[in-house]
Image (cartoon, rainbow, N blue to C red):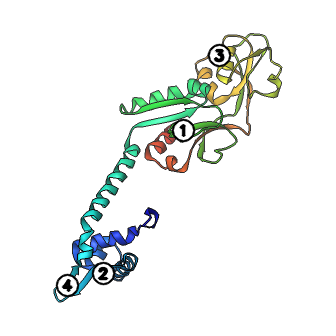
Amino acid sequence: MKRTHLPLNGLRVLDAAARHLSFTRAADELAVTPAAVGQQVRALEDTLGVVLFRRTTRGLELTPEGEAGLAALRGGFLQFEEAVRAMQAGQSSKSLTIAAPRDLTQKWLLPRLARIAAGDADLRFVLIAADDAIDFTEANIDLAIRWGEGPGAHEGEALESDGMVTIERGGGADTRIGWPGCSPEDATALVRVADAGLAIDAAAAGLGRATVPELIARDDIAAGRVRVVGDPKAGRLGYWLVAPLPQWRQAKVRALVDALAG
């Protein structure tokens, strides 16, 4: 019999009925009706082509055929339980693998992870640089942060932000600092760097003005390394916490999402 055709529900009913030698008590354990237990047993007997129970004046008895497979069946269910516990062990672990753009990790994520870890000494983080497509299975990623219009094909929650801000150190020339994904007016910038994080550092060094996501400039603005020129501008793009549904449902991932988005 193929594994995909194993009558697992019927086998579970057989195990309970054999332990109790009573369809009624087996039904109580399984939270079903005695009639449902009887139907499952008859269906299993039809599938296997054997009689598993006989009713006698003393009550319900296992046949030799039913008795023959019982030890192996119970051993199999114990192995199922061990497999489930092994799979749930990852749920209870305090290790989280996070994929995020390098500049966001440096400017925004690391300080927040430090504060989160200060409240739980058992937490462990593995950080992966990921700017484009994210393969959650390749590196066993629990959570990712992506820049885009939404969560894409995954579950997600937006990180609140004021959009894009133009920053400078102050008092310098109006030289534009460009980076991949920068605003159109920065496309012909005199200074170009690899990402928005370096654009912030270039502005802090006095090389000019950069228009960058407010989220990753927030700490540098608060620390006085750069100042905002003009008003923030809302945009259609933003940073999203994302994960496939199985990861998104994990308690440790939900706790991290709440801590980062809160």
Left or right: residue 206 compared with residue 89: right
Which of marks 1 and 2 precedes in the sequence?
Answer: 2
Would you say 195 lies left or right of 56 here? right
> Which residue has dot 2 on it?
51
- Between the C-alphas of marks 4 and 2, the distance is 16 Å
**Disc 1 designates what residue?**
138
Element type where label 1 sits in the image: loop
Against 148, residue 16 (above or below) is below
Q: CA distance from mark 3 to mark 4?
A: 83 Å
Whichever of labels 1 and 4 marks the residue nearer the N terminus, that label is 4
Q: Quadrant of residue 90?
A: top left
In the image, residue 121 sits, relative to residue 208, either above or below, namely: below
Residue type, mark 1 in image: Glu
Where is residue 197? Give x, y as percent.
64, 22
Of the image marks 2 and 3, the number of the one nearer the N terminus: 2
- C-alpha span from label 2 to label 3: 78 Å
Q: Residue beneath label 3, please?
A: 201
Q: Which residue is mark 4?
A: 59
Mark 2: few/some/many CA within 10 Å (<14, 14-19, 20+): some
Q: Quadrant of the N terminus?
A: bottom left
Q: CA distance from mark 2 to mark 1?
A: 48 Å
Identify the secondary structure beneath mark 2: loop
> Residue 21 is drawn in which quadrant?
bottom left
Residue 118 at x, y percent in the picture: 40, 29
Tell me: 160 left or right of 23: right
Residue appearing at x 67%, y 44% in the figure = 150
Tell which tag, 4 or 2, sits nearer the viewer.
Answer: 2
**Residue in view at x 36 percent, y 81 percent:** 42
Mark 3: few/some/many CA within 10 Å (<14, 14-19, 20+): some
Residue shown at the point (60%, 26%) measured from the top left: 102
